[in-house]
Amino acid sequence: MSDRVYGELCKQVYQRSRIFLTAEKKQFLTSRLEKHRRQLQAVDWDDYLHVLLCSTASFEMDNLIDLVATNHTYFFREPSHFDRLREGLLSTLMGSHGHAQSPLTCWSVASSSGEEAYSLAITLAEYNRLIAPLEWRIFATDISRHALKKAQAGTYTQDKLNLPSVDLLARYFRRGTGRYEGQCQVKRVLQERVEFAQANVFESKLPVPERSGLIFCRNLLIYFDLASRQQLISKLENMLAPGGLLLIGHTESLFNVQHQLEQLGGGIFRRSH
Ligand SMILES: C[S@@+](CC[C@H](N)C(=O)[O-])C[C@H]1O[C@@H](n2cnc3c(N)ncnc32)[C@H](O)[C@@H]1O
């Protein structure tokens, strides 16, 4: 792949997703795209670029984003976030909004294949079962069509379900039998409260409520440049309900990003008013 074609692909990816590909990612992108290019019967990279740019629907662009996006995730990733929600933050959140009456609205901004949203769903359902009544709803979005399909199906191999306790498996998953042996599907009691939709978080119209009490935006900021991180955090700050919480990944920070959020430590931030 020539530097010219690579530069154009980076530009397209950035315009569509804000994912910022550096020059070092050229080899990564080439190897990820090679098989797809051959399937498209594009004779070379110029031909591929031509197909990409001439494709009237956004279908080919979505394929490119699917291949570029890193969808790596797992259940109860960065578990201290779920622990802290259970051990006090949810009670504070409910207290500040009277959420016992109105549902707590949550948003998983880059939900990938759904593990984050379902981990949160389990945490909220367990809170409701063991601690205090809680009405809740989760909206989960991701730019990757491929990842979302998996999220919507809610089916995972059992050895990947690293849940904090074995009871949770029986309570919230149906175990497959016969040819589905080893597969587990999220039960309806959770699935009907989690709504997945494809969305680029930078779009002006998003398929989520205008305000959320809890926003998970974890392991997404790392893909963006400072200008995009600033734009995203300002947007999320506005979309938090007063007293609401924003959670970012443990390896991420809001360093050099302007905001009015109160830092609670460990990648947790609160909107005060
Ligand atoms: C590493 S995964 C993070 C998944 C999960 N939040 C976690 O922490 O385990 C990053 C996700 O961000 C998504 N993504 C990248 N750019 C995006 C954008 N502009 N809008 C929405 N999702 C995006 C990717 O498709 C990918 O699924």
Image (cartoon, rainbow, N blue to C red):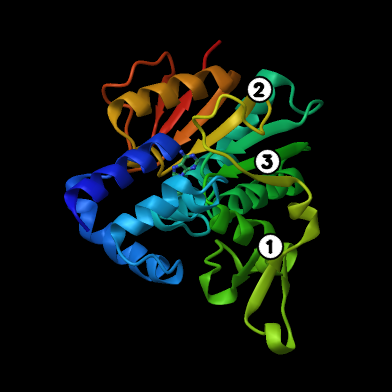
Is residue 40 depicted above or below 92 in this figure?
below
Is residue 44 depicted above or below 202 in this figure?
below
Report the number of numbered marks.
Answer: 3
Residue type of the residue flagged with mark 1:
Ala
Q: Position of residue 95 (x, y in %)?
A: 68, 22
The residue beneath circle 2 is 210
Q: CA distance from mark 2 to mark 1?
A: 26 Å
The residue beneath circle 3 is 138
Q: Relative to 191, is 60 on the left or the right?
A: left
Residue type of the residue flagged with mark 2:
Glu
**Can residue 79 be seen in the rendering of this structure?**
no
* Quarter-of-image position of residue 213: top right
Q: CA distance from mark 3 to mark 2?
A: 13 Å
* Quarter-of-image position of residue 209: top right
| Farthest-out residue, bottom | 178
Choose between 123 and 236: the one closer to the eye.
Answer: 236
**Nearer the viewer's eye, disc 3 or disc 2?**
2
N-terminal label among 1 and 3: 3
N-terminal label among 3 and 2: 3
Q: Position of residue 264 (x, y in %)?
A: 42, 27
Q: Residues within 10 Å of mark 1 (few under 14, many from 20)?
A: few
Q: Residue at x 63, y 27 (%)?
A: 212
**Can residue 64 be seen in the rendering of this structure?**
yes
User: Mark 2 falls on what kind of element?
Assistant: loop
User: Mark 1 falls on what kind of element?
Assistant: helix
The numbered disc on residue 153 is: 1
Q: Residue at x 53, y 58 (%)?
A: 75
Is residue 228 depicted above or below 164 in this figure?
above
Residue type of the residue flagged with mark 3:
Ile
